[in-house]
Amino acid sequence: MLGDMEQMCRLVEAVDPFVTGTIWLGKMNDITRRVDQRIPRAEQAIAVIQSQQSDANIQRLYLLLKDNGKVRWKDSIKSVLRKRATFVD
Protein backbone atom coordinates (compact mmCIF):
# COMPACT_ATOMS: atom_id res chain seq x y z
CA MET A 1 0.00 0.00 0.00
CA LEU A 2 1.72 3.10 -1.20
CA GLY A 3 -1.19 5.46 -1.61
CA ASP A 4 -3.97 7.10 0.32
CA MET A 5 -7.31 5.41 0.88
CA GLU A 6 -8.95 6.94 -2.19
CA GLN A 7 -6.03 5.83 -4.38
CA MET A 8 -6.25 2.31 -2.97
CA CYS A 9 -9.99 2.12 -3.64
CA ARG A 10 -9.47 3.36 -7.21
CA LEU A 11 -6.68 0.82 -7.71
CA VAL A 12 -8.83 -2.07 -6.48
CA GLU A 13 -11.68 -0.88 -8.71
CA ALA A 14 -9.34 -0.66 -11.70
CA VAL A 15 -7.80 -4.13 -11.32
CA ASP A 16 -10.92 -5.96 -10.09
CA PRO A 17 -12.27 -6.82 -13.58
CA PHE A 18 -8.93 -8.42 -14.50
CA VAL A 19 -8.42 -10.43 -11.31
CA THR A 20 -9.90 -13.91 -11.10
CA GLY A 21 -8.36 -14.71 -7.71
CA THR A 22 -7.64 -12.33 -4.89
CA ILE A 23 -6.39 -8.80 -4.37
CA TRP A 24 -4.11 -8.68 -1.33
CA LEU A 25 -3.72 -5.44 0.60
CA GLY A 26 -1.13 -4.81 3.28
CA LYS A 27 0.95 -2.09 4.85
CA MET A 28 4.54 -1.47 3.77
CA ASN A 29 6.74 -3.43 6.17
CA ASP A 30 9.87 -1.97 7.77
CA ILE A 31 9.62 1.25 5.82
CA THR A 32 12.48 3.00 7.63
CA ARG A 33 14.75 0.02 7.00
CA ARG A 34 13.74 -0.50 3.36
CA VAL A 35 13.97 3.10 2.21
CA ASP A 36 17.44 4.58 1.78
CA GLN A 37 17.38 7.55 4.13
CA ARG A 38 20.26 9.18 2.25
CA ILE A 39 17.98 9.87 -0.71
CA PRO A 40 16.79 13.48 -0.73
CA ARG A 41 13.20 13.80 0.51
CA ALA A 42 13.12 10.14 1.66
CA GLU A 43 12.25 11.24 5.18
CA GLN A 44 9.32 13.24 3.86
CA ALA A 45 8.11 10.32 1.72
CA ILE A 46 8.32 7.95 4.69
CA ALA A 47 6.25 10.34 6.80
CA VAL A 48 3.58 10.52 4.09
CA ILE A 49 3.37 6.73 3.75
CA GLN A 50 3.24 6.22 7.51
CA SER A 51 0.46 8.80 7.75
CA GLN A 52 -1.47 7.09 4.95
CA GLN A 53 -1.13 3.78 6.79
CA SER A 54 -2.32 5.10 10.16
CA ASP A 55 -4.65 2.87 12.14
CA ALA A 56 -7.59 5.19 11.44
CA ASN A 57 -6.93 5.09 7.68
CA ILE A 58 -6.52 1.31 7.71
CA GLN A 59 -9.86 0.95 9.47
CA ARG A 60 -11.46 3.31 6.96
CA LEU A 61 -10.01 1.33 4.03
CA TYR A 62 -11.34 -1.90 5.50
CA LEU A 63 -14.82 -0.43 5.87
CA LEU A 64 -14.72 0.80 2.27
CA LEU A 65 -13.55 -2.52 0.77
CA LYS A 66 -14.74 -5.23 3.17
CA ASP A 67 -17.66 -6.21 0.92
CA ASN A 68 -15.43 -6.84 -2.10
CA GLY A 69 -15.11 -10.63 -2.17
CA LYS A 70 -11.77 -10.52 -3.96
CA VAL A 71 -9.99 -8.35 -1.38
CA ARG A 72 -7.93 -10.16 1.23
CA TRP A 73 -6.08 -8.53 4.10
CA LYS A 74 -2.44 -9.15 4.96
CA ASP A 75 -1.50 -9.64 8.61
CA SER A 76 -0.34 -6.03 8.87
CA ILE A 77 -3.94 -4.92 8.24
CA LYS A 78 -5.56 -7.62 10.35
CA SER A 79 -3.48 -6.70 13.40
CA VAL A 80 -4.67 -3.08 13.18
CA LEU A 81 -8.29 -4.16 12.81
CA ARG A 82 -8.05 -6.54 15.77
CA LYS A 83 -6.49 -3.81 17.90
CA ARG A 84 -9.31 -1.44 16.98
CA ALA A 85 -11.97 -4.18 17.45
CA THR A 86 -13.04 -4.01 13.81
CA PHE A 87 -14.44 -7.19 12.29
CA VAL A 88 -12.02 -9.21 10.19
CA ASP A 89 -13.35 -12.07 8.07
Image (spheres, rainbow, N blue to C red):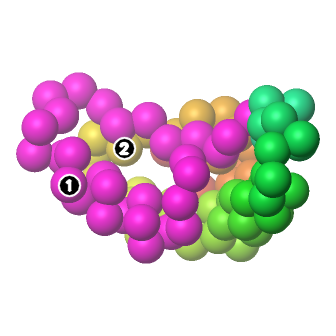
Left or right? Give the position of 60 relative to 42. Answer: left
How packed mark 1 is, by other alpha carbons closer than 10 Å (few <14, some 14-19, many 20 or more), is: few
Look at mark 2 in the image and give the residue it sits on. 71
Left or right? Give the position of 67 relative to 51. Answer: left
Q: Quadrant of residue 75?
A: top right
- Looking at the rendering, the stretch of residues picked out in magenta corresponds to 1-29
**Element type where label 2 sits in the image:** strand
Q: Is disc 2 in contact with disc 1, using a CB cutoff of under 8 Å?
A: no
Residue occupying the point 58% across, 34% down:
74
Residue 55's label in the rendered image is: none
For the residues marked 2 and 1, what is the alpha-carbon distance in whole angstroms?
13 Å
Residue occupying the point 32% across, 55% down:
11
Q: Which residue type carries mark 2?
A: Val
**Element type where label 1 sits in the image:** helix
Q: Position of residue 41 (x, y in %)?
A: 79, 59
Look at mark 1 in the image and give the residue it sits on. 14
Position of residue 11 relative to residue 33, above or below, is: below
Residue occupying the point 44% across, 35% down:
24
Left or right? Give the position of 72 relative to 47. Answer: left
Closer to the camera in the image, 20 or 50? 50
Q: Which residue type carries mark 1?
A: Ala
Position of residue 36 relative to residue 68, above or below, is: above
Q: Position of residue 36 (x, y in %)?
A: 83, 35
Evaluate whether residue 86 shows in this view: no
Question: Quick one: which residue is furthest to the top in this view?
Answer: 21
| Magenta-drawn stretch contains 54 | no
Q: How many marks?
A: 2
Position of residue 2 relative to residue 57, above or below, is: above
